[in-house]
Image (tube, rainbow, N blue to C red):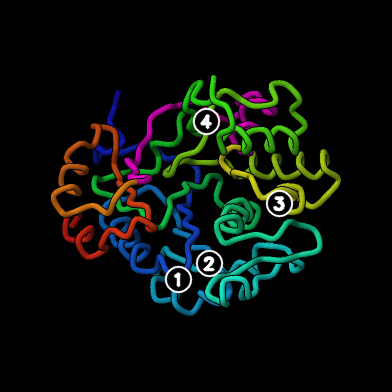
Amino acid sequence: MIDPGQAIPREPHPPTAIVTASYAPDFERCRLLCETIDARVTGFTRHYILVEHSDVALFRQLEGTHRLVIDERDLLPPWLRSFRDPTSRFRRRIWLSPRTMPLRGWHVQQLRRIAIALNAPEDAFVYCDSDVAFVRPFDCGYFWHDGAVRLFRREDALAGQTGSEQREWSAHAGRILGVAHPEVSPHDYIATLIAWRRDSTEAMCRRIEAITGRHWVAGIASRRMFSECMIYGRHAAEVAALRGHFLSGEELCRVYWTGPRMSEADMRDFLAALAPHQVAVGMQSFIGTDVATIRRLVA
């Protein structure tokens, strides 16, 4: 098998964009992501950064020939708007509408990631969180094979679990997609550095509207426990029968999800443990790992 990190010429593939949903506290991490994309990633048309209206001016600093900052007001319906949340002494934001549950930023970032595929011209979108950095050369053509897009799936990862968030997300996906059986998929579709098709995302949103009788945003956000990756994965696999996709369990990005703040030595060990096919690392921003240290180690 060819490593995705190998800097080799690839056959021409349909237009493919990179998508990052971010917010002001992650700005420096997002800047590092942009630097490593510019240095190491090929095979994409544009890099879209999706942010809340109040963060647009800050993120405009990162724009360039192939990078655009997109205001969520240009993606999401006008009846969903953010406000400063008085319950957090106005430090946090909350998104309110008459059609959805009250939402936090991590909810709305997911909705933006879906919405960009309904508004941009590319045929596929590679989703990459803003706390990721590429550490090896990578060509986005890796996600394509004979006109099909690589669908990440962690096989049977939910089998036997009880009471997990992933199971709740999977069950909600099944409800809004009209998939009665199984109620919960045994498979997990959640990862960073994964790809979706534009036409499949459009079909997914049409399906949600047909099943729920509501705008797709309202259908998804009728509950607060949802995952856009789980919804897309279940639609692609169970509704569309993998049409236009092929399955892969390779996690291209090694992520430090939880744990204590990493020391520089810990981070060196983390980088040294990358599998041959892994081309990026993710350090969850809430852990508080120093961005300058990450930049120095991945430079």
Visible residue check, residue 120: no
**Spatial CA span between label 4 and label 3:** 20 Å
The residue pinned by badge 2 equals 51
Out of 258 and 220, give the one closest to the viewer. Answer: 258
Could you tell me which residue is drawn at 65 percent across and 23 percent down? 241
Estimate how packed mark 4 is, as few (under 14), some (14 to 19) or many (20 or more) residues with alpha carbons within 10 Å: many
Estimate how packed mark 1 is, as few (under 14), some (14 to 19) or many (20 or more) residues with alpha carbons within 10 Å: some
Q: Is residue 24 above or below residue 199?
A: below
Looking at this view, name the residue that lies furthest to the right: 213
**Spatial CA span between label 1 and label 3:** 23 Å
Callout 1 amino acid: Ala
Locate the N terminus by quadrant: top left
> Magenta residues, as a range?
231-258
Question: Residue 285 occupies which quadrant of the picture?
Answer: bottom left
Callout 2 amino acid: Val
Callout 3 amino acid: Ala
The residue pinned by badge 3 equals 221
The residue pinned by badge 4 equals 188
The residue pinned by badge 1 equals 24
